[in-house]
């Protein structure tokens, strides 16, 4: 069976194809009106370590802080930047500095029921603003998923995983905060922007 399209039908199909492409492209963008939330794919993109330029650029720079965890785990924080959406994004690398495969302790997820429902993450991280006497918890999307790297369980010896964590932003006059993650030492980091 042969199907013939008129020029008008072909233009209509092309317009629909372009509209669908734009809708898909815009849905993946983070802009005004989306409450500053990153799309769910950000976590998997960070897992692959290939599409978060700020984390990659930070790899060659001196880290803001290095936090030692259990069994040879190391968290290097490479940046903590304010974003226009009213949040702070912390980027870094979770590394296995040991000589054997390490299972990342489940405690790094924290103990909040909503976050635990969504699997392994860095959802237990907090920022502490001693100046204002406030603690900031990891942001979540409308389904309760933490806005942080998810879906990892272990690291091979020498393996490094690019990670990100998003928090509500402290007041603009606050630049130094304590970063805390269960099973890791805490460290003071400086927020830029």
Image (spheres, helix red, strand yellow):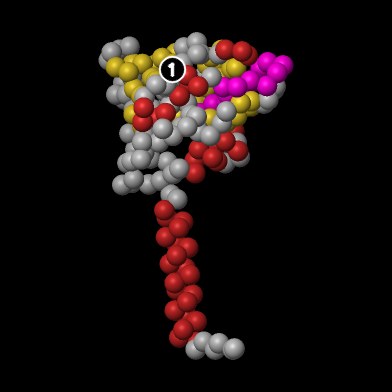
Q: Which residue is mark 1?
A: 179
Q: Tell me the magenta residue range.
A: 91-104
Does residue 92 belong to the magenta stretch?
yes
Foreground: 186 or 113?
A: 113
Q: Can you name the residue that lies furthest to the right here?
A: 99
From the top left corner, tell me how far across and down residue 46 is, in percent.
55, 36
- Seen from this angle, which residue lies furthest left? 132
Closer to the camera in the image, 100 or 82: 100
**Viewed as shown, does residue 66 lie left or right of 125?**
right
Residue 78 falls left or right of residue 39? right
- Expressed as whole percent of the image width and height from the top left, the position of residue 25 reads 46, 56
Q: Residues within 10 Å of mark 1 (few under 14, many from 20)?
A: many
Which residue shows up at 46% across the image and 84% down it? 9
x then y, percent, for residue 90: 46, 27
Q: Residue at x 55, y 13 (%)?
A: 69
Magenta-span inclusion, residue 144: no
| Residue at 45% in and 58% down | 24
């Amino acid at each position: 069976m042969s199907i013939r399209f008129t020029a008008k039908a072909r233009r209509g199909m092309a317009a629909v194809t372009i509209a669908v492409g734009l809708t898909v492209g815009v849905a993946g963008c983070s802009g005004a009106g989306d409450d500053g939330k990153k799309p769910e794919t950000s976590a998997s993109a960070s897992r692959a370590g290939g599409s978060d330029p700020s984390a990659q650029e930070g790899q060659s720079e001196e880290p803001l802080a290095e936090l030692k965890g259990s069994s040879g785990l190391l968290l290097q924080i490479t940046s903590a930047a304010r974003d226009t959406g009213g949040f702070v994004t912390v980027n870094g690398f979770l590394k296995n500095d040991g000589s054997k495969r390490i299972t990342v302790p489940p405690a790094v997820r924290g103990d909040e029921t909503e976050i635990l429902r969504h699997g392994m993450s860095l959802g237990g991280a907090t920022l502490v603003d001693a100046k204002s006497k406030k603690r900031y918890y990891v942001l979540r999307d409308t389904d309760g998923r933490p806005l942080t790297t998810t879906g990892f369980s272990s690291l091979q010896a020498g393996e490094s995983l690019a990670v990100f964590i998003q928090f509500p932003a402290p007041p603009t006059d606050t630049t130094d905060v304590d970063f805390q993650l269960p099973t890791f030492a805490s460290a003071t980091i400086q927020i830029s922007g």
